[in-house]
Amino acid sequence: MKIDAEITFRKLEIFMEFMEKGNIARTAEALGISGVSVHRALHTLEEGVRCPLFIHKGRNLVPLESAFTLLEHGKEVVALMARGIDETRQAAGVGQGRLRIGTLYSLTLETVPKLIMGMKLRRPELEMDLTMGSNQVLLNMLEDGVLDAILISISEGEIDRSRLEVLPMFRDDIFLAAPASFPLDTGHPADLREFHGEKFVSLAEGFATYAGFQEAFHVAGFEPEIVTRVNDIFSMVSLVQAGVGLTLMPGRMKKVYENSVQLLRLAEEYQMKQTIAIVFARNREHDPNLLALAAEGRMYARSFIDTPNAPP
């Protein structure tokens, strides 16, 4: 005989609690539900089993021998299913003692260390693997299940909100960056058209800042002379320090390089912001490790109003 649809794990849970507590009121209190819900669950479970489980004595339900038989097997079934779910989650890498996080290079200066420190307080037993890469590389690794969560700059076109959960943390401005020795006029915002003859360095395609770089010079109406493209923001800023060229970069880099690199706010027509967010698969939104990461992300988001470490 097929198992009736009225027999569910939730009803078995209520039934087992009732068998332990002995009456409907105490069962309802223990499970945080109403007495009506307890009574309905027991009644429909009885219908699903297709035999009597209780008799009424006054206002009380008294278990029959059949109820104790169901209790014995119900405990085994629920325990077996709980173990099966645990093993299934282990096979999927969910809720284990390791969390694989991907991040943009620039977020390792402040954002990632703060999140990791918070996570260690919440879940001290958790080990975290850190992978750095471009926006596109990290998104691909998340899609392939290589990473559990990523910290990237989000844009509407590349994020599938039906499959990915997105938790924005902060927005960051993009600035013109020049070596400390460069004769930069800081009396007004940077009009990129005034730098038509200058050499530039940039990140490679796939990085969030590269997309902003292209957009800004498109607005300026000219193709900048790019001396070299690099695969991480620290190499790019080192080239700027060395005088190889100018670049555009997010304000969060200012703290480390404020003595060797000048940052100048862009003129209004070129201004843009990056929205930095934690992204993970929506079907893993109940993973306790990801819930802890999301909680830390929300706390970090509350630590400032808008742009962190931005020059005036």
Image (tube, rainbow, N blue to C red):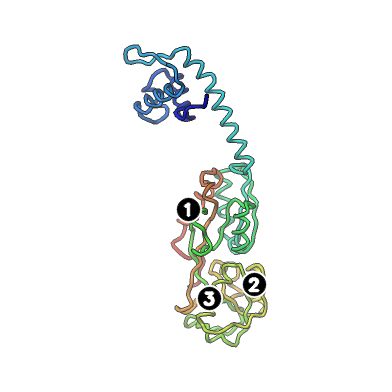
Q: Residues within 10 Å of mark 2 (few under 14, many from 20)?
A: many
- Work out whether residue 34 or residue 11 is closer to the camera in this orientation and state it: 11
User: Which numbered disc, 1 or 3, marks the residue that appears first in the sequence?
Assistant: 3
Q: CA distance from mark 2 to mark 1?
A: 30 Å
Frontmost of labels 2 and 3 is 3
Q: Which mark is residue 298?
A: 1
Q: Residue at x 49, y 58 (%)?
A: 169
Q: Is residue 186 above or below residue 155?
A: below
User: Which numbered disc, 2 or 3, marks the residue that appears first in the sequence?
Assistant: 3
Q: Position of residue 29 (x, y in %)?
A: 38, 27
Q: Secondary structure at mark 3?
A: helix
Q: Residue at x 64, y 71 (%)?
A: 204
Viewed as shown, does residue 122 lie left or right of 59? right
- Residue to which mark 2 is pinned: 236
Identity, as a three-letter code, of the amino acid under mark 3: Glu
Q: Residues within 10 Å of mark 1 (few under 14, many from 20)?
A: some
- Residue to which mark 3 is pinned: 215
Viewed as shown, does residue 236 lie left or right of 189? right
Identity, as a three-letter code, of the amino acid under mark 1: Arg
Q: CA distance from mark 2 to mark 3?
A: 18 Å
Q: Secondary structure at mark 2?
A: helix
- Work out whether residue 180 or residue 83 is closer to the camera in this orientation and state it: 83
Identity, as a three-letter code, of the amino acid under mark 2: Met
Picture quadrant where residue 252 is located: bottom right
Q: CA distance from mark 1 to mark 3?
A: 30 Å
In the rendered image, the residue lying farthest to the left is 58
Q: Residue at x 47, y 27 (%)?
A: 4
Q: Is residue 108 above or below residue 12?
A: below
- Work out whether residue 188 or residue 278 is closer to the camera in this orientation and state it: 278
User: Which numbered disc, 2 or 1, marks the residue that appears first in the sequence?
Assistant: 2
